[in-house]
Image (cartoon, helix red, strand yellow):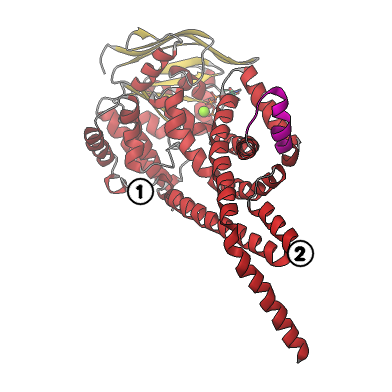
Amino acid sequence: MNDKVMIKLVGLHKSFDELEVLKGIDLEVHEGEVISVIGASGSGKSTMLRCINFLEKKNKGDIYIDSKLIKKSSHDINTLRAKVGMVFQTFNLFPHKTVLKNVMIGPSVIKKADKIKAKEKAMELLRNVGLEEKADVYPAMLSGGQQQRVAIARAMAMDPQVLLFDEPTSALDPELVGEVLQVIDELAKSGMTMVIVTHEMGFAREVSDRVVFLHEGKIEEIGTPTEIFENPKSERLQSFIASIW
Amino acid sequence: MEHIVEILNSIGDFFAVVFKFAPKFDQAIVYTLELSVFSILLGTVIGLVVTSLKLTKLKWLQKIADVYISIVRGTPLLLQLYFIFYGLPLIGLNFDALTSAIIGLAFHNGAYISEIFRGAIVSIHYGQDEAARALGMTKIQAFFHVILPQAVKQSVPVLGNQFIIAIKDSSLASVITITEITLTARQFSAATYNPFPILFVAGVYYYIMITLLTKLLQWVERRLSVNER
Ligand SMILES: Nc1ncnc2c1ncn2[C@@H]1O[C@H](COP(=O)(O)OP(=O)(O)OP(=O)(O)O)[C@@H](O)[C@H]1O
Ligand SMILES: [Mg+2]
C-alpha cells in the first residue's frame, strides 16, 4: 500500500425512486489497499460497489479513479470500467464461450488485442487461478468455485487497476469457498487494489488493510480489522459483530 | 377374392396417377421453394430490423414496430396477401404475383420472427449484459458479442417452427394465381376429376421439404448446443 489514492468517493448519494440507499459516502482507497465492506443486508454494500463502476448511476457526489474525476459520458464510463474490474456473486460467465474465450473476450473486443498475445496472457491468468487445463471447456461444465475463478481471471485480463468483488463466495457451496478466497488472497499479496463486499468475516479480517462497516447507507465505522472486529466503537457495529459470530 | 382384386386394382390405378403426375410438379416445386426461401430469408431480415426498432429507446420507432406486429397478428394471412396483390396497385404499387406473394409472406413472417428474437433477447439474464459492460464493452459490443449470439442460439428451435409454418403458408400464394404446389394440384385435380392421388403427391412434396428442413435445423441445434455439455 502507498499514498496514491486509487478510488475516491465524495458525498456519494443514490436513491431508487423514494428509497434513499446511499446517504453520502466518503471513502478513499489507496493503491494496493484491500478494503472489505461489511454490513447488514440492505445497508447498501452492493449499491456502493455498483456505483463505483457506474452499473448504478449515482444521484449525487463525485467518483475519482486514479485521481481522475469520472463524468457521466459513456466514453468516460467505458474507460473507467476497463480499469475497474468487477467480480459478481453469480459469476456471470458467458455460457456460449469457452473458458479461454471468456478470459480473452475483454482484451480482444475492447482493446482489439493481438490474438496470440491475448491467448498467451489468458492462459497465464488461468494458470494463476489453477484452471489451465479447463481452457477449452464451457462454463456449464465447471463447479461454482471454478467458474468464479474464471470470472476473476476474466476481470484480470483487462489489467485493471482496481478489482471490485460483490460477495464472491456467497453463491458457493461451503467446500468451494476456500479455493476462491485463496485466489483473492494471492491477488491481495500481489498488491492488487481491491474492494470486497463479503460476509466472510474471518477472511475480511485476514486479508483486509481496512474494513468499512456500512449501516443504512452511511459509513458507520472504518478502521483496521483489529479496530473493527476487536474494538468496535459504535453500538451498531458492536451488535452487528455480536450477531454474526 | 374378387373384392381383393378390385382393391388391388384401385391401388394400382391410384399409384399410376401418382407416378404420372409426380414429375409434372417440377415448376410448382420451384415456386414453392422460391416462396419459402425468400419469405424466410426476407422475413428474418425484417424480423431483425423490427427487433432492433423495438430495442431502441425511441418511442415512435417502437410504436411503428408495435403497429406492424399487431396488424400482422390481428388479421389472416389470406387477407394480407389479397391486400398486397389487389390493394397496393390501387395506390400505384404494382408487383407481379410472385413478388407480391414473397412480400406478403415475408411481411407476415417478419412480425413473428421479430417476436421470437425479442423474446429470446429479453430472456437473456441481465447479468450477462452487466458482466460485459463491467469489462468495459460498449452497449453495442455487449449486444453483438454477448447477448445476440446467445439469443440466436436460444431461438433456433422456435425459429425452426416458424420456418416450417412459412413453407406451409406458401400454399396460400395459390390464391393470388401462383402455380405453386397447391394450386398446381388443384388444377390437375380439376382436369382429371381424380383429386386424391394428386393431392397425395402434393402432400408428399411438402412432407419431404419440411422433413429436410427439420433435419437441417436439428443439425444446427446440435452444433449450437455443444456448450451445454
Ligand atoms: N435496482 C434496484 N431497484 C430498487 N431498489 C433497489 C435496487 N437495488 C437495490 N435496491 C434496494 O436498495 C437497498 C440496498 O440494496 P443493496 O443491494 O445495496 O444492499 P446490500 O447491502 O448489498 O445487501 P445484501 O447483503 O443483501 O446484498 C435495498 O433495500 C434494496 O432493496
Ligand atoms: Mg449485496
Magenta-drawn stretch, dominant element (helix, strand or loop): helix
**Residue of label 2:** B193
Judging from the image, mark 1 belongs to the subunit labelled: A
Query: Is A47 left or right of B193, judged from the image as shown?
Result: left
User: Whole-percent x and y of residue A180?
Assistant: 36, 39
User: Whole-percent x and y of residue B129?
Assistant: 48, 30
Q: Which residues are magenta?
A: B80-95
Say whether residue A200 is visible.
no
User: Whole-percent x and y of residue B99?
Assistant: 60, 36
**Residue of label 1:** A137
Say whether residue A44 is visible.
yes
User: Whole-percent x and y of residue A238?
Assistant: 51, 23
- Residue type, label 2: Tyr
Query: Is A185 left or right of B69, judged from the image as shown?
Result: left
Seen in the picture, residue A169 relative to B183 is either above or below; the reply is above
Which residue sits at x=41%, y=48%? A143
